[in-house]
Amino acid sequence: MKTLNIIESAYRATLEEQDDTIVWISHALKNAGASLDVLLRGNAVNYAVRGQDASGLRFGARVQTHAPDLAPDLTALIGKGVTVHIVEEDVAERGLERSDLLEGVQPVSRRGVAKLFAGYDQIWHW
């Protein structure tokens, strides 16, 4: 069974943890032998931007001591054989260029997302 994890809600739980919960569970599932890929869309396309630095992030008096750094987590997923797709239009709408993105992410157009779904047994949308 092949699964596609769609991540659209960006930075979920990253105040409590430095990891995105869905990226983390994707690693755990892959390590357990699951066949899965990831699609980043909406604000989650920011996960694939290289060179981000959220150190110094604070909310009032609360300092985030373990700021999220998701690009290395995605790079590690790609290294495990997980295809990380990214919606091209969502990238462009955020003023990002292809050159801003990690090596190995696979662009897909919004129109191509439905065709992408056809290659999976299950679609999980987060």
Image (tube, rainbow, N blue to C red):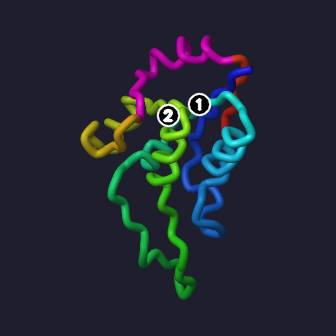
Identified at 36% across, 60% down, the residue is: 52
87 vs 12: above or below: above
Queried whether the magenta region covers residue 107, the answer comes back as yes
> Secondary structure beneath disc 1?
strand
- Which corner quadrant of the image does residue 11 belong to? bottom right
**Camera-side residue of 22 and 58:** 22
Extent of the magenta region: 105-120
Identified at 55% across, 50% down, the residue is: 10
Amino acid under disc 2: Val
As measured in the structure, the alpha-carbon distance from the residue carrying label 2 to the one carrying label 1 is 6 Å
> Secondary structure beneath disc 2?
strand
Q: Which mark is residue 74?
A: none
Q: Where is residue 63? Give x, y as percent.
A: 53, 82
Label 1 sits on residue:
37
Queried whether the magenta region covers residue 31, the answer comes back as no
Q: Where is residue 103? Give x, y as percent.
A: 35, 39
- Which corner quadrant of the image does residue 95 belong to? top left
Identified at 45% across, 42% down, the residue is: 45
Which corner quadrant holds the C terminus?
top right
Q: Where is residue 101? Give x, y as percent.
A: 33, 43
* Residue 72 falls left or right of residue 118: left
* Residue 122 falls left or right of residue 4: right
**Camera-side residue of 69 and 29:** 29
51 vs 28: above or below: below
Mark with earlier residue (2, 1): 1
Identified at 33% across, 58% down, the residue is: 51
Which corner quadrant holds the N terminus?
top right
Circles 2, 1 touching at the beta carbon (< 8 Å)? yes
Amino acid under disc 1: Asp
Q: Where is residue 115? Give x, y as percent.
A: 53, 11
34 vs 56: above or below: above
Label 2 sits on residue:
84
